[in-house]
Image: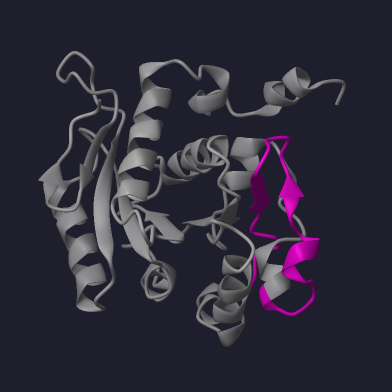
Amino acid sequence: MDSYNDFFRFFNKRVIVNLDPRSPEAESYRSIRTNILSSNPTNPPKVLMLTSAHPEEGKSLTSANLAIVMSEIGKKTLLVDCDLRRPNVHSILGIDKSHGLSEVLYGQEEWDKVLKNVGIENLHVITSGAIPRNPSEIIGSDKMKLFLEEVKQVFDIIILDVPCILAVTDSIILSLLADCIFMVVMADKTPREAVLRSMSMLSDVKSNISGIIFNKVNMRRSHYYYYYYYGSRRRKEK
């Protein structure tokens, strides 16, 4: 590509933190970042998992935007597409999904050989790779645990974009490997019962549920573009 600006023409138009960094939406992602990092200043969470109850609630888009704002403050950030059934990170960022996580977990590639540079300082991406025949088995393998242990030695923040909770077991398996978990909920679309059921399933395996990120809040009904609920306390954007 001819220039840095040319690169961003390939980004999904909803990657707001790059396309409109001063927008209220972009600032909301930075507010989420602040809440995450300030939750434990001496030992901030390293492996973040984003999921949703159902598909098409914006979890992959939220993962991408959150990864970018983490990298903005100098955090060496790795975004991993762990959805080995319906991967979407590659399409959002305009990159090829081949040679990614599935090849690492099958032992065909070393993780540092499949890192993708998307033209943003401090940000690297590992795409899904080829769609495997047995996603749950390789996600739950010792190879996945080893992979995370190794990347934790290199990166400050690892963001896992995982499948929706109610469709497959992959997210439950991965939740046991994450320091904190966030549910992405689409306002006025996601049924309350689906959110409660998803959180109950995570609670049953004692996963560390840290919060809910509400997506596509109607501005005519709320003064937030994105409303962030962290733990059991509401924190207004500053």
Q: Residue at x 54, y 79 (%)?
A: 145
Residue 127: quadrant of the picture:
bottom right
> Given the current orientation, which residue lies at the most extreme bottom position?
142
Residue stretch in magenta: 105-133
Q: Residue at x 21, y 62 (%)?
A: 199
Was residue 132 drawn as part of the magenta stretch in this picture? yes
Q: Is residue 154 above or below residue 223?
A: below
Is residue 72 visible to the viewer in this orientation of the structure? yes
The x, y position of residue 134, in whole percent, is: 58, 77
Q: Is residue 109 above or below residue 158?
A: below
The x, y position of residue 103, in whole percent, is: 73, 70
39 on left or right of 109: left
Was residue 234 drawn as part of the magenta stretch in this picture? no
| Majority secondary structure in the magenta region | loop
Quadrant of the frame with the C terminus: top left
Q: How many marks?
A: 0
221 on left or right of 48: left
Q: Residue at x 38, y 62 (%)?
A: 43
The x, y position of residue 50, in whole percent, is: 40, 54
Residue 30: quadrant of the picture:
top left
> Given the current orientation, which residue lies at the most extreme right position?
2
Residue 228: quadrant of the picture:
top left
138 on left or right of 31: right
Question: Relative to the observer, which residue lies in front, 176 or 46?
Answer: 46
Quadrant of the frame with the N terminus: top right
